[in-house]
Amino acid sequence: MNDLELDVRPILRNGGEPFGAIMGAVAQLEKGQRLKLFATFKPEPLFQVMASQGFSNEARLLNDGDWLVIFTPIAGAHTATVSENAEAPESWSDPTHYLDCTELDPPEPMVRILEKMEAMQAGEVLFALLGREPIFLFPELKARGHAWAGDFDASGTAYRLMIRAGERA
């Protein structure tokens, strides 16, 4: 199986944000396929995002000062993202609210989830199904005092997220 190559250097040189292109490439990976990413800098913030999706990384400085990072899927990796304040998510009550955001483009899933959370009472739980890991949602939930736990389903195509409403400020 060939590696999938993605060169985000043109996006970066034009002042753009390549995160969407990178996550799009990750979504296209076949089981066991590696992603070879070319960038103008060592993309260390991306390492944690990719680790949460079950990838290790190997970064190499190229002769021209650019970087090549190879993301390799970790066999059997099944990782979950859990907020610092999520004490024993397995003991939370069953969800009382459900949202399917798998067909929505960002930022719509985040908007809908935050709107729903505003209407919920402390301790109530929301279950949301998303098409990708909502990494930009997590800081918003934290700022509002909500707890969460999430992971990808077995197929790796849907992200399951449970959010427990926090106390209102």
Image (cartoon, helix red, strand yellow):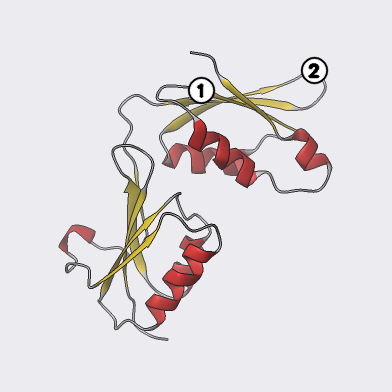
Percent coordinates x, y for residue 33 in the rendering: 47, 22
Q: Name the residue under label 2.
A: 63
- As drawn, the label of residue 122 is none
- The vertical placement of 6 against 142, above or below, is above
Name above or below for residue 47 compared with residue 92: above
Instruction: Determine the residue positioned at 25% across, 76% down.
Output: 124
Q: Which of 63 and 109 is in front in this view?
A: 109
What is the crowding at mark 2: few (fewer than 14 residues within 10 Å), some, or many (at least 20)?
few
In space, the residues marked 2 and 1 are separated at their CA atoms by 22 Å
The residue that label 1 is drawn on is 34
Residue 8 is situated, as x and y percent measured from the top left of the image, at 71, 35
Q: Is mark 2 on a helix, strand or loop?
A: loop
* Direction from residue 121 to residue 61 in the image, left or right: right
The residue at 41%/81% (across/down) is 118
Task: Say whether residue 34 is left or right of residue 67.
Answer: left
| Label whose residue precedes the other's in the sequence (2 or 1) | 1
